[in-house]
Amino acid sequence: PSFEQYNSKTMATFHPKQPTGNITTFNIQHGFAEALLRGMRSSFMKDADYHHLTQCETLDDVKLNLTETDYGEALADSDAMTPAAFQKVAVEKLVTEFKYLRTQTVEPLSTFLDFITYEYMIENVMLLLKGALGGRDINELLEQCHPLGMFKESTMRSIPTFENSARGYQDLYQTVLVDTPVGPYFAQFLLESASSRSGGSYNVLQEVEIEIIKSSLIKYWLEDFYNFTMSLGGDTAEIMGELLRVRADSNAINITLNSFGTPLNEPAMRTSDRKRLYPGFGHLYPAGTANLTDVTDEDELGRALEPFPQYAAVWNIHAAGHGDKSIDDAFYERDVQMLELAFESQMHFASFYAYVKLKEQEIRNLVWVSECILQQQKDEIQKFVQVFSQNAPWRK
């Protein structure tokens, strides 16, 4: 099928046949899945667990302390003692829990959970394409793919095998990506790129860097996820909508910041390619993102964010340049607070998204602590964002 035919059929946002329900009807369809989720919430590491981990001297000590946490059973069969091994075990545990949750759901929650996995599918496709351009081994690339974003193995192995040419990418789309959940986003990227450039759409992938393609696909996914969330209505639309709006704003800020010193910051590219990467919703949209289009350096970016206090505060941390906290750390702290608050109310879907993202943060914390111990950088070991900490600044 052509891009136009495929796109017109599939890009329409799914509208649930059944609403999420309210306090009187939610539990009829989704009560069991939410009960499971609330039980899984108790698996997060406690303040005492983090304290014990930061006192460890070796990775053997780390594994010993983790046996007292929810990771104990998963680590029991693991002989490797490296941060990467800890990460792999923790991710596999998260994926197992997520897939079990998915099997216990009905519409529209099942589609909501599927939307969460699309982000990882996009990341895996772009990892394979980037690896193929660099000539890396397919088995090594598959090891690095996130388990939540895996297609069939035959599909995954076929992605990097297409030749790096216009015809190769045409075949990649029509024979592989067209049948995947992220196919519509890929088609939309090719269509929009073709309409803004001379020449055929199949040449686009040769002209645009992989990271720009990835940012475009993430933008389309965010917009699709946001439209679906808002169609659900109720507390899900209110709470999850806010999480996605902030996520969209973070993407816009990071895209602008990372473009400095690259061709994307050239005048022609700022108003064409970079502008198209900004999501079409969020607190910054449309006035804020319009201002970001004209930003050329960090000082101008700071001024563009001044009308938005929540982002001005985050930017000031970056601009201060103390070295103790990066802009990513500031975003992580704010995200963790918002995701934790999603658990403070019931009968909505946002807590399912929050669980996955908070577990990812916990895994980042585990890897960070392990790396600091391995490299004997104990002075840096406290620089992580703890999840559900009773000592968090915003809880005081």
Image (cartoon, helix red, strand yellow):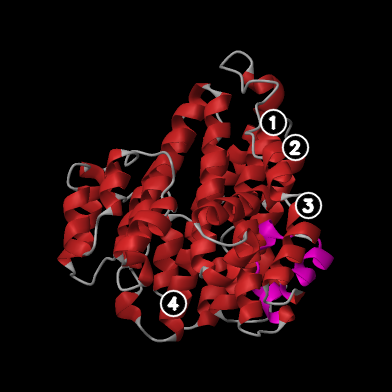
Q: Earlier in the sequence, mark 1 or mark 3?
A: 1
Placement of 135 over or under 279, stated as above or below: below
The residue that disc 4 covers is 56
Does dot 1 land on a helix, a strand or a loop? helix
Q: Earlier in the sequence, mark 2 or mark 1?
A: 1
Give whichever of 236, 374 is nearer the camera. Answer: 236
The three-letter code of the residue at mark 1 reads: Phe
Q: Gap between marks 2 and 1, in whole Å?
A: 8 Å
Q: Position of residue 89 (x, y in %)?
A: 64, 68
Q: Residue at x 52, y 58 (%)?
A: 360
In this view, the residue in front, 251 or 46, is: 251
> What's the residue at 23%, 72% (across, down)?
323
Element at label 2 = loop
Q: Mark 4 or mark 2, which is nearer to you?
A: 2
Q: Which residue is mark 2?
A: 104
- The mark lying in front, picked from 2 and 3, is 3
Q: How far apart are labels 1 and 4 at the CA level?
A: 39 Å
Q: Please say if 378 is above or below 207.
A: below
Dots 2 and 1: beta carbons under 8 Å? yes
Tell me if residue 63 is in the magenta stretch: no
Proximity of marks 1 and 3: CB atoms separated by less than 8 Å: no
Kindly identify which residue carries mark 3: 179
Q: Which residue is mark 1?
A: 32
Span of residues in magenta: 140-160
